[in-house]
Structure formats: C-alpha cells, structure tokens
Image (cartoon, rainbow, N blue to C red):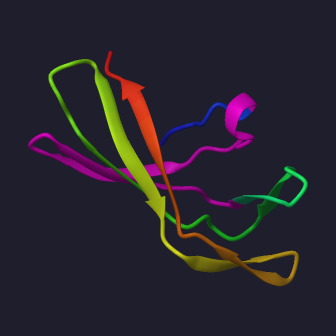
Amino acid sequence: MCQDDPAISQIDFPADIFGKLDGNQLIFSKRYPKTVLQDNFGKFVKADEAQPDVIYQAKLGNNSKILGTWRIERTFRKLNGMLVEIGPITGVWWMDRL
C-alpha cells in the first residue's frame, strides 16, 4: 500500500501496489479504489469507480536514484452518470532508494 502526497497530487486515499523485481527490472502497478480526474478548469473530481491501473517500469542502476516510465491504458469510467474516456496517458517517474 502507498499514500501519495495529497498536497501535490490531490489524492487523499491510499493505493495498492502489486509488482515484482526481476534482476534489475522493476515492474509494478498502482491501483486506486476511486478514479481521480482533472476537469477543464483544473479542479480534481473523484468518481466511485476504481482508477485504471497505473503501470510503472524502471531499470535499477548502481546509484540511489530510480528513473522509469508509467502508463495508463485507454479505458472508460462513469463520472456523474456520464461515460468519460481516460488515457492513454504516459509519463516519467523517479524515486530515491534509502
């Protein structure tokens, strides 16, 4: 389980993490119990349906920083009774090993 920083992400509930480390390849998915979308005015809106899986990948190097990519596959969710398209969305992520 992980908790995003709500001051940065506007997500104030935890997500489940599932994944594996295979050699130097890290692959995991993050599953939120609710969908969080940003409307046309920049406001975050929550829907009761689960968020599509966010799939993370990275190759671990010899230093303490982990750099990788994430993606959400194209899918649909109901928001206030309306069907809304989500994705595909991709980005980069990083973290420091302690």
**Residue 31: percent from the left, percent from the top?**
51, 57
Q: Residue at x 83, y 83 (%)?
A: 82
Magenta residues (range)? 7-35
Residue 54 is at least partly visible in this image: no
Q: Residue 8, percent across and down?
A: 70, 32
Q: Is residue 11 magenta?
A: yes
Which of the 4 quarters of the picture holds residue 66? top left
The reply to whether residue 78 is visible in this rendering is: yes
Measuring 58% from the left and 70% from the top, which residue is drawn there?
87
Query: Residue 3 falls in which quadrant of the image?
Result: top right
* Closer to us: 52 or 15: 52
Q: Where is the C terminus found, in terms of image quarters?
A: top left
11 or 85, which is in the foreground? 85
Residue pictured at 57% horizontal, 78% vertical? 75
Query: How far across and down, in percent of the image, does residue 93 sit?
Result: 44, 39
61 lies left or right of 80:
left
Residue 92 on the magenta span: no
Residue 36 falls in image quadrant:
bottom right
Q: Going by the image, does 87 lie left or right of 90?
A: right
Point 30% across, 52% down: residue? 19
Left or right: 85, with 56 as reference point: right
